[in-house]
Amino acid sequence: MERRFSNISETAKSTLRTAGGVIKAIASTKKGAIGLSLSAFFFSMATIGPIVAPIDLKYVNPSDFYLPPSLEHPLGTDYFGKDVLRLIILGSREVLSIGVLAALITLSIALIAGLSSGFIGGWVDAALTTAMDITLTIPAFPLLLVLVALFRGASGILFMAAILSVNAWAGLARAIRSRVLGIKEREFVEAAKCLGLGNLHLIFREILPNLMGYIVIILITGVTGAIYAEVALFTLGVAPYSQANWGVMLNMALMHAGAVTSARYANLLAPALFIALLQIGLVSLSSSLEQYINPRLREEE
Amino acid sequence: MKWIVKRMIKAAITVYVVLTFTFFLIRMMPGNPIERAIQEYMMQGIPEYQARNMVSTIFQLDLSTPVIEQYIQYLGNLARGTLGKSLTLAGTPVITLISYALPWTVFVLSVSILASFLLGILTGVAMAYKRRSILDNVALTLSTVLTAVPNYIFAMFALFALAFIWPIFPKMGAYDIAITPGFTPEFIFSVLYYASLPFLTYVATTVGGWALYMRGSTIDVLGEDYVMAAEARGLSSRRVMMSYVGRNAILPLFTSLTIGMGYIFGGSVLIETIFVYPGIGYLLSVAVSRRDYTIMQACFLLTTITVVLANLFTDILYSKLDPRIRLE
């Protein structure tokens, strides 16, 4: 038993060492450096941001309505006189937590489906592949829209995250399946099979560790997709109302202030810029990670 | 041939699954739209049996029969093209609304997808041939950025910049309402002009993905022996690029095209809402905000069927390009 524990701490240590090495390698490329710094920027914005720059959500002051950008309010104020930058900082918390939670749920479903499909094969594979194909064909965003409209009573971060995973799992499961099929044929898996090691050993000790890199990439891709859909649902004004979410801010700017068609309220479009930067950061990060893992792509830099 | 038949069966299964799923979602869920509509009528002082009859005509379902029979009625209605009536626009048949909206979406999207695919392929091949040149580097960065930015965010920027700051393009609509619709050059020009910003958004946010994919695919093919053999035989580099490299490098992109179709059609909800473009995506988003479930259901079904048909078309095209499929 004791040996096992020391084994685990050993594994944890070596994992941390590998992670450090990967980050160093990625940071040395231009794309990777941009991805890492943008991701770190948004991570700290969501975690410590609202503590450094707090905001009173109940604040309403007619004399502060729609102020243009100034030193005191770098991005101006909104229709209630609230500071737009502080609202964006607080909003990042919800945007990111829904995104990460949705990606985790999506990843779990995708892992179970992808592993069973690739590993078990036969009719299980046939059934799961058909399910993946059908899910991939159905237009994702309209489905989400209809679902959110139907469950109009429900709200909360977990509900949003769960809804967002309804169709996102399929693409990722397909990617995992094809990886598993590739790994299954490799010598070390054959060797473990010959040694008579059980399926659980094969999955957890042979296949999963070799998927680790891809799992991280898939997780980031999942976050990117979830944020796209989540902010879109809030922008259309169908998702349950939330106090501070970039999508809600965009919805108010578009529908109530008409920000797109008036220079006066242009500052209300600031969340759009932050979403663009966040997505660029996440995509750069996952793409440079992919280049690191897949040496065939690495020669590009 | 067998391959195409298989694809058709899969397409039919997909449509059937979506139809069934939609029916049971709207009919069976606790507090479902049908029950809610009945309650709303009753709250207006209409007796229950009458409210039930009214909702029955709207959804075109005989609510007094068992659910399985209603399901059969529903499938029969769809086969006949009856989609019920709008919940909020008293008595308007949903099929009328759909028939006005769908052509706009199909028009803009088919032109956009085609343009984006072709432009992406050409850019990708150029990038692969001129690897590590300035062109390649600029195109790589631009593609990554454009692919990462969500299409609705791009649409907002485009609207703000090109319809407001520099008012080059119209802010909303599908054509100038001062012009009478018809096959006149004026009207056609107006339609194209009003479609510019949606078109720009669709192309700009998808072209980078095709270019990156085609670049990688072309680089792979360039390393193949048959390309070297073709060059060694003294074939012109143009011939090698067109019939040996290009033709083979395109093939893997078709699989993505089928997946991309659902994404692009889905995105039309957002793009059409931002540009107030009267397509099926806009209709869906209006229906959702008004909680008009009959329109919602019809929009969702028709978008799915359109995507399935578009995929089938892509598959047929693919089988024409890849002789291996025909042998299977």
Image: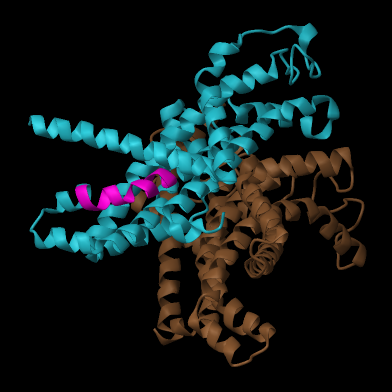
Chain colours: A cyan, B brown
Quarter of the image for residue A229 reads top right
Residue drawn at 41 percent across, 60 percent down: A133
Q: Where residue A26 sits in the image (x, y, percent)? A: 49, 43
Q: Residue at x 45, y 67 (%)?
A: B11
**Number of residue marks:** 0
Can residue A47 be seen at all in this image of the molecule? yes
Q: Residue at x 47, y 43 (%)?
A: A25
- As drawn, is B7 to the left or to the right of A127? right
Residue B216, position in %: x, y? Answer: 55, 64
Please state the horizontal and vertical placement of residue A124, each as a whole percent of the image: 24, 60
- Indicate left or right for B92 with A131 as reference: right
Above or below, A243 against A279 in this view is above
Magenta stretch, residue numbers: A205-218
Q: Is residue B2 left or right of B288 when viewed as pictured?
A: left
Q: Residue A270 appears in which quarter of the rendering?
A: top right
Magenta span dominant secondary structure: helix
Q: Quadrant of the C terminus of chain A?
A: bottom right
Q: Nearer the viewer, residue B266 or B35?
A: B266
**Is residue A214 shown above or below A102?**
below
Q: Is residue B59 above or below residue B95?
A: above
Q: Quadrant of the N terminus of chain A?
A: top left
The answer, for residue B101, to whether it is visible in the render is no
